[in-house]
Amino acid sequence: MKQKQKNLVYFGLPLIGTILCLWYIKEATFDIVYTDYIRLVNSYLPDVWNPAKFFVPDVLTRIPIHYLGRIINVTFFGYSTTFDMVLGVLGLGLSGLVLAMYCKKQSMSPVWYLFLMILLFGLDKWEMLTNGTGWGHFLAFALFYYHYLVFDRMVQGEEKRYDRILLLILPAVITLGVAGPYCAVYTATLLLFYLAIVWVKRHQGEQVRYWISAGISAVIPFLLYLWSNSYAVEDHAGAVDISLTQLLGSAPGFFPRFLLKSLASMVIGGETLTDWIECGKITDRQVYVIGLLIVIGYLLALYLNWKYRLYKETLLPLIFLVGGMGNHAIVLISRYIFLKENYGMSSRYVLQYQMGILGIILTIGLLWKRIDCIICRTAACTFCVILLMGHGYTNYVECKKAPYREQYGEEIAAVALQFEEASDDDLRKKFDYKESRADSGEKVRQALTILKEQEWNIFRNR
């Protein structure tokens, strides 16, 4: 394939994926604040320039880059939720660009690369795409991927200018400015591989001072984040006051069931699986079987990495595998307090989970021509077919639901325009903001009052 054709394929697909996701945003959303936006409006608006709202003890837990996003949004777009959603899609596009750079360098087959892009831009993450409050999370993962890419080429002896400096400064920028709670798995993954590199290079008699410094540069920002997080006030509506050890003792089966369901949501969208369970089309046990398929995919990818020594050529697929497993674990540890097995299937976690799936496909795709074991080849092919069918069906379902999601937004907007006549109970139910809280409706009214006074969002140009 000629160079121009390669560039068109590798860099054209992320552009197409970004455009398709922007189309989905247009079809499935309405520019109206609700759910998490209520808290943001009450906390930071109308005076987005007020330093007192920025320089708070737990500022690092609030994703500082969001402050800049809010300033731009309020100044130029009248606090548009669509603006935030577009930023999220662009962040996803940046992830695609990083993967394009990597796959082009590895000369990955266009077929496997296309499959990778289909997974990356899939609508199984619809909840993240349609909730603009999380736009920074997409940017965070793009930066994670870029950091891992720089690390990988450094390890492989393909260092570029400024790579050494980048490895030292990226953790501070990412952890303290963009990552928020996602920094835990990011930092843990980095440390694990830094320790492995130090161990290997010491046994080879090489200098390890730089790699130790790089590890320290990753730890310090994380410790600063934890310090800032100690000042944060946790507010989990619907959470149960139970410790991890207590739940392990009273209901040990909860944890593997939660994990298997979260894994199953990577084959078919969690919302679809939940609907099937509730209407009797599928049982919990069948969902566990689907989750086991992903476990097999992870084990197969790890085995192929070891058998064909792929980690000696490139570490990125293995980094993604470790990161994906870490994200499943962190969601379990942080969300078991809701005591709901289905909680881990939420679309909001797909952005975290998909790192592992991308690692599986990268491993299989890069090694496909070398896999000489018929069992492994058959298992890999079967796994990919199931994954493609599941994602294809999820995309189909979400495209069908898009007009209804937009209609839901229009209904919220209609209530918002008449919020002064609506009851607190109506506002609580319609705006999906911490419905279990007694002051939910009051908080919604407070947020809408701010927006109306400033003529922002739904009240703009009225």
Image (tube, rainbow, N blue to C red):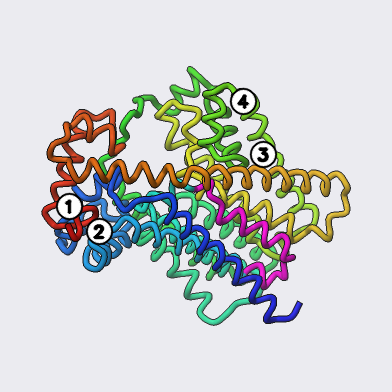
- Which kind of residue does numbered mark 1 sit on? Leu
CA gap, disc 2 and disc 1: 9 Å
- Which kind of residue does numbered mark 3 sit on? Val
Q: Is mark 2 on a helix, strand or loop?
A: loop
Rendered position, 264 above or below 149 = above
Residue 365's quadrant in the figure? bottom right
Mark carried by residue 451: 1
**Residue 236 appears in the picture as rendered:** yes
Which region of the structure is painted magenta? 102-125
Give 239 or 72, whichever is nearer the viewer: 72
Q: Mark 2 points at which residue?
A: 79
**Residue 231 appears in the picture as rendered:** no
CA gap, disc 4 and disc 2: 42 Å
Mark carried by residue 282: 4
Rendered position, 335 above or below 80 = above
Residue 192 x %, y %: 56, 53
Circle 3 crowding by C-alpha within 10 Å: few under 14, some 14–19, many from 20: some
Q: Is residue 149 on the magenta stretch?
A: no
Q: Earlier in the sequence, mark 2 or mark 3?
A: 2
Q: Earlier in the sequence, mark 2 or mark 1?
A: 2
Q: Is mark 1 on a helix, strand or loop?
A: helix
Q: Which of marks 1 and 3 is nearer the N terminus?
A: 3
- Which kind of residue does numbered mark 2 sit on? Tyr
